[in-house]
Amino acid sequence: MPQESTPRRESKRTVQQMVLVGVIATAAGIALGLSIHWFPPANSTQADKIDTLWDVLIIATVPIFVLVTVIVLFAVIEFRMRPGEENLDGPPIHGNTKLEVIWTAVPAILIIGMVTYAYIVLHDIEKAPAAGNPERQVAVTGQQFTWSFAYNEGGKKFTSAQLYLPVGESVKFDVRSKDVIHDFWVPDFRMKIDAVPGITTHYRITPKTNAIGNHDIVCAELCGLGHAYMRQTAHVLSKAGFQAWVTKMTRQPAATGGGGGGGAQAGTTDAKALFTQGNPDTSATACGSCHTLADAGTTGTTGPDLDKVLKGKDAAFIKQSILDPNKVIAPGYQANIMPTNFGDTLSPQQVDALVQYLSKVTNK
Ligand code: CUA
């Protein structure tokens, strides 16, 4: 019976081809998926577990994608309509219990497996450090369009516009918002959570040894016109470096409180450097990154051109514009773009030095 055996042999060969193509595509897909650097460096202990989870999901999902794609492609080629078959109907099939049990049970087992593993990872990365390992708490506040970080180091409280962390110590962030929903994210640490008005959300990370250096802090929730500018820096320091920073931050109020010392500091404040680079201690945003000022050579266009809007204005107006920027909005610009926390991130001496400088160079 050569007429019957030929199609059977052909369909067997087709299945062999599908398996071969499927195996090659799976191997290539997994190799490609694992070789691509999807993420920035993994700088927290949590990041390692998340990246491993990602790799496992690639290994688990590529074969399924290949299985579906290969069957669809082969079916299209194999069962295509040939000339003369325009009026033929397919064979009447109704149900296949074995097949239905398989395609229900296998995905169910796969999903239960992946959900269980993901749950274990989630539980792991949210776990508090073991007893005896202290954990630092940092209060993160999001507002249009800046983050601020409140510390309590041995009873001494202070706020910083940039995040500083010691390496190897767990930190728990208490995340809040003053206005709309933001999202606190340091991609190098992987963890990410919404800052929601009215509630406090949390996550914790432990910076790894390789984390020493600077990391971008990003707002990951569209929160208004300045969303893209809501970027700051997380500085991971050695434990000694962090202690030195804490000492500096906790000493600052005393220095500014002393009348004579404060006066001397104002004399040495380089207002132009402050304008172009911000405050290196609290890393207050540099004015020049958003504003044009001919004397400082900056060309920012996010905020108004200071050569124009400050011309003929007195020192009181300039000071108000720095500390309470929403009070007077230049025509063509919108409120709530400029951070309102310069009163916290600049010392009174620095504000005065900036006011003097801007008053001088815009009223030449
Ligand atoms: Cu805050 Cu986007």
Image (cartoon, rainbow, N blue to C red):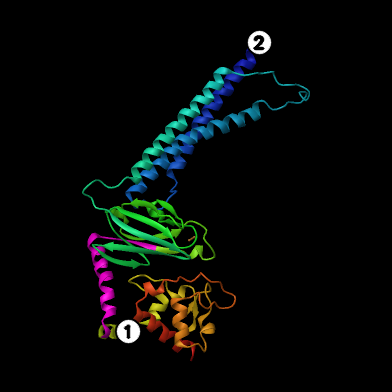
Observer able to see residue 296: no
Residue under pointer 1 = 266
What percent of the width, then of the height, locates residue 265? 29, 83
Secondary structure at numbered mark 1: helix
Q: Would you call the spot at circle 2 few (<14 residues within 10 Å), some (14-19), or many (20 or more)?
A: few
Which residue is drawn at the image coordinates 36% and 65% (left, top)? Answer: 162
Nearer the observer, 245 or 9? 245
Query: Which residues, given as a range, are shown in magenta?
Result: 233-259
Residue under pointer 2 = 2
Q: Is residue 356 above or below residue 191?
A: below
Q: Amino acid at mark 2?
A: Pro
Nearer the observer, 78 or 59? 59
What percent of the width, then of the height, locates residue 85? 76, 23
- Quadrant in which the N terminus is drawn: top right
Q: Residue placed farthest to the top in the image?
A: 1
Which residue is drawn at the image coordinates 22% and 62% (left, top)? Answer: 240
